[in-house]
Amino acid sequence: MGRAFTGRDDEPESAPYAPPLERPPEWPADSWNRRVAVAIGFAAVFFVLALWRAGTAAAESGAVTRFFLVLAALMGLTALFGYAYWRPKRGAPGVRFVPAGVAGTTEVRSRRSVFGLLVAMMGCAAALAVGAAVEIFVFSNGFPWVSPVLALLGVPCVAFVVEVLLGRIRSGSLLLGPDGVRQRGWTVESYLPWVSVAGVRADHHGYPESWVLGTPTAAWARRRTSRIFRLDRMPVEPMIEVDSRRFDIDPVLLHRVLEFYAHFPEMRRELGTPRAAERILRRDLDDPHQH
């Protein structure tokens, strides 16, 4: 397998000129969600308070200090995750050509930092709940009823980490090939062949989304990869919902890329070749018939 063309700043080639693209009218101008901003603010305040309490508890008990240190880590990760997840992607797009046998794919990479923060956050929550349950059970007199309650609260967090280790929850990616569109979400896999694509629609649910719409008789393949967690919505009708917050590319650019290959079937043959990654990096998405 040869070296993948990533279209990132660390490539030896100089970055090409990238003209601005028109934002879909369905998407309002970028602005922070107030409820998200308040939640991030609360998490940051609790992070500071937990650190302060861990410092004052150092002379009292090692168990208390450990509890508040882990709580501080959890609150800090929560604030970082909220900021990273809801902040629009900026900079060079995470697009690359991935050779795979005779044919390749054009991959739009996910934001691995966001997924990493999610996993770290769940791991911290598991350590907090299970660790506190063990500490209380071992060092309390009699039967501590709060211990099994904390342990039960930690079960979903532990299960999440296990699902990640088993590969059932993954950071995922969006793969564009000459045959169709494949999405590997956090907990869902979906495939829609180009012959079944009816169009691309911009939607907004507090964040920009692009919908690759299928025909009523589309050969639509999909499955859930985790039976426990449902972090992705499974549409009822044939479509692939692309949540822009999860991908390492500007939402407007991603939407225009999907529109370009949906509207110009003759250009799909370049998908799965270095040319498609170069086109996306250049933002060369004008009508090819006008060239």
Image (spheres, rainbow, N blue to C red):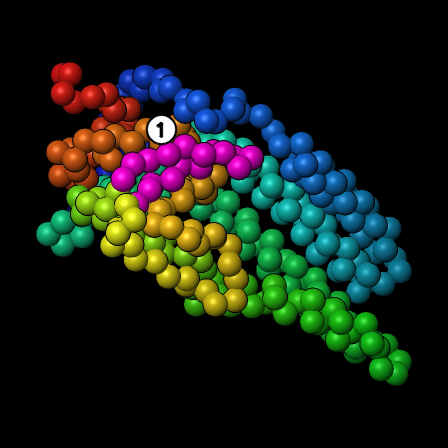
Determine the secondary structure under disc 1: helix
Extreme-front residue of the structure: 216
Is residue 67 shown above or below 155? above
Which residue does the image show at 80% across and 52% down from the upper left? 54
Quadrant of the drawing holding the C terminus? top left
Q: Would you call the spot at circle 1 few (<14 residues within 10 Å), some (14-19), or many (20 or more)?
A: some
Which residue does the image show at 44% across and 22% down from the upper left? 25
> Residue 211 lies in magenta, yes or no?
yes
Q: In this image, 288 relative to 118: left or right?
A: left
Is residue 147 shown above or below 49? below
Residue 110 at x, y = what percent?
A: 40, 44
Amino acid of disc 1: Leu
In depth, the one of 223 and 185 nearer the eye is: 223
Residue 275 appears in the figure? no
Residue beneath disc 1: 253
Q: In this image, 20 relative to 56: left or right?
A: left
> Residue 45 lies in magenta, yes or no?
no
Residue 240 at x, y = what percent?
A: 36, 46
Which residue does the image show at 40% across and 44% down from the upper left? 241
Residue 146 at x, y = what percent?
A: 81, 72
Span highlighted in magenta in the image: 198-214
Residue 129 at x, y = what percent?
A: 71, 65
In depth, the one of 175 and 221 nearer the eye is: 221
